[in-house]
Structures are given as C-alpha cells and as structure tokens.
Image (cartoon, rainbow, N blue to C red):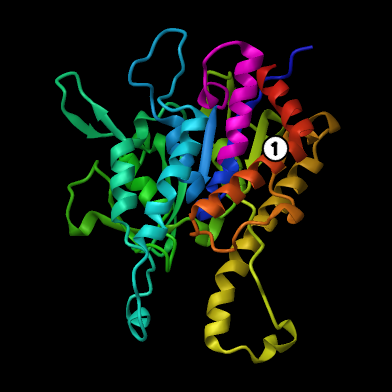
Amino acid sequence: MAEEKKVRILSLDGGGIRGVIPATVVAYIEKKIREEKGDEKRIADYFDMIVGTSTGGLLTGFYLKPNPTPTPNGPLTAYEAEEALKVYTEEGFNIFNASKKRMYGLRQFFNATQFDPTYLESTLKKHFTVKEEDGTERDLMMHELVRPCTVTTYNMNKKSSLFLRSTDVNRKDGPRTYKVWEALRSTSAAPTYFPPAEIHNYSLPVNDETTLYNLDGGVFANNPTMCAYSEARNMKFPERGVDFPSANQMLILSIGTGGGNFALGELSKSPRWDVLKWAKSIPNIMMDGSIDTTDYQMRQIYDTLNKVHQDSYLRIDVEQHDRKYETDMADASPENIKKLKLAGQKTVDHYKKHLDSFIKRILD
C-alpha cells in the first residue's frame, strides 16, 4: 500500500570542512535513488524542503541551484550531489588552510578571526551566478532556488537569530530578497574563523542603515532539525497536497557532521581552568550540546506518535569509533579530507539499512 503523503525534509548540520561527511551521505542517497528510478534526477527532485546551518547551508545552496538548461524530464538542479562533494574536496584547502592568517603575539587579541574570507566569497560568487540570454551574469537570488529552503544565521544588528528563507520574498510584512552567495557567506561566518558577513535585503535601498551583520547559525542551531520542523509547520506544500503539516505528515532526514571529538583534558583540574582554557572549550561544548539536545527533542516528538509514524524521523551521524579525523573543523589538508571521506563512507555503511528503508519511503 502506498505511503500516506508526507512532506520530505532534509536537515544538514554545521561543522566546517566536516561537511564532507553529509555530502558523502547525500551523494549515496542520490546515487541509490537514480539506480532505483533509472533516471538522472537529483536530490532536490525528491525532497520538498532543505534546511542547513553553516556548512550545511552551503550544501543546501548547491543542492538547490536551478538547472540552467532545464528539460521536461531532466533534473531540476545544476549540480549532482557528487559535484557538491567535489567542491568541498577541491576548494576546502584554499578556503581554510591557504587562507589562514599569520598571527603573532598580541595581534590575535586585536583581530581574532583566523581566516581571510576572500577566497570563500569568490568561490560562492563563482558558483551562484546566473547567465542571462544576452550573455551578462548576475547573482542568483534565494527565491530562485528550486525548493523552499532556510539557512540559519545570527543577526548582530538585532542580537537575535535570523532565518534566511527562499520564501521570504512573499512575506506579508514586506519582502526580503537575498543573494544566495551572501546568505551562504552569512550562515558560514563562524566566530573566530571568519569575520561577520555583511549582507543586504535587496527589497530595500542598499545603504549603511539596511546592511545586516551576521554570524554563523551554529551559535544557536548547529543542528537545525528543530528549525526545519518549525518552519515546515507554518508552510504549504501544494506539490505534496499538504498544508501546515504536523509531525506525522513529515518525513525528516537529519545528517550530522561528526562533531564531539574535541579534547577536554585535565578534567579533574577544570575548577581551576583559566580564562583562555574556558574560552577555547566553551564554543565546542555549547555547539555539541545543542546538536544532541535537538536530536533529543525531535525523538521525543516522534516517540509520541502512532508506531507507524515513529520512524519518519531519521538521524544520521558518524559513530564515535569512526571519528578518526582531525578535531579542527578547518583542517582541509589532503590527509584530513581522505579521513573525512572515509568517515562519511563508514557512516553510510553503518546506516545503510536505515538509509535504504528511508529511500524506499521517499520513492513511495
């Protein structure tokens, strides 16, 4: 019997270069679907909504960029999932390792950002442009992405979370129109890694008063699955024939980046840690804690449902014993990229039964 209509949602965690891991998992999903269907369609053809934080936000953009030469039966999007993974493996070194600033002594106290964002910004601009019929190029806008999506960011102007949505162009309180590359730069502006992103709502005049200064959404939602659930609850999905879906009308796949392998040495001495020790530890503790908390909250929601719906939420993350890569989420050295790809493949292997079952439900 066919599955009851469900809105299919993909949620992607933050985690810097560890985005190689979810990119590997999604590449497997797309390949498996294409084998089952015998066509060339892509991940966006089978998910109704994608939500991402930081590196997950970057992947969201790649998965949803429209196909520049669409055909009636062809794929919706420009990039295969394997191509998104390739961008990470080929561009990661220049975005992180080669962009690392040289800081000596007291200089790091006056400018604590470790990386120059120039290469990251040029890479995003290169991938998220549109060529017009007259040959000119322009920046791709969020509302032009092929599926509803949200990327998380923290707005320093208002000191609050900010969700950059592809659907914001239709807001009743006034449209918000963002460039894709600026939204992705915004969601990946991790404190101490990259400086805050300056972005604009192009529905308003561009000036100092309308400029937004944003940080990485990982400061409050490194695992954005609860955000995805909340966003979907307030949306209509006409292609699915479902409006304002409840939990039992959602099929949610949440993919992590294998965090939590940071070091916390000398725990017995933690009551006497100095300011620098705490400053280095707190971001990792808070980000890792929020990831686990979100998974706990989602599991509690789905455990209250009828048994037939309880497995409609699936969380995928790297097993602890497979986290053999470097703890620094900005280490994009060739050696660490290999370790991350291996961790991604081991994650696929570990969850293969669950993933294949989930894929079957997507196709149903």
- Can you see residue 141? yes
Instruction: Look at the image and give the residue range highlighted in magenta.
Output: 23-47
Q: x and y percent of residue 348 in the render? A: 70, 37
**Picture residue at 75% right of the left edge, 33% below the top:** 352
Q: Residue at x 46, y 32 (%)?
A: 83
Give residue 242's quadrant in the image.
top right
- Quarter the N terminus occupies: top right
Q: Is residue 97 magenta?
A: no
Q: Main secondary structure of the magenta part?
A: helix
Q: Residue at x 27, y 29 (%)?
A: 130
> In the image, is residue 183 above or below residue 207?
above
SS at badge 1: helix
Q: Residue furthest top?
A: 72
Residue 97 placement, left or right of 294? left
Relative to 107, residue 213 above or below = above
> For residue 344, which quarter of the picture?
top right
Q: Please tell me which residue is depicted at 68% across the width and 85% down the height of the picture.
A: 270
Q: Amino acid at mark 1?
A: Val
Asked whether residue 178 appears in the rendered view, the answer is no
Instruction: Residue 341 in the image: state x and y as whole percent.
Output: 60, 44
Pointer 1 residue:
348
Judge whether residue 25 is colored magenta.
yes
Question: Residue 78 versus residue 189: which sits nearer the camera?
Answer: 78
Q: Nearer the viewer, residue 58 or 202?
A: 58
Image-based side of 29 in relation to 220, left or right: right
Q: Position of residue 252 (x, y in %)?
A: 66, 35
Q: Residue furthest bottom?
A: 272
Front-most of 328 and 363?
328
Vertical side of 238 occupied by 13: above or below: below
Q: Is residue 321 above or below residue 122?
A: below
Pinpoint residue 282: horizontal percent, then vertical percent: 58, 74
139 vs 306, left or right, is left
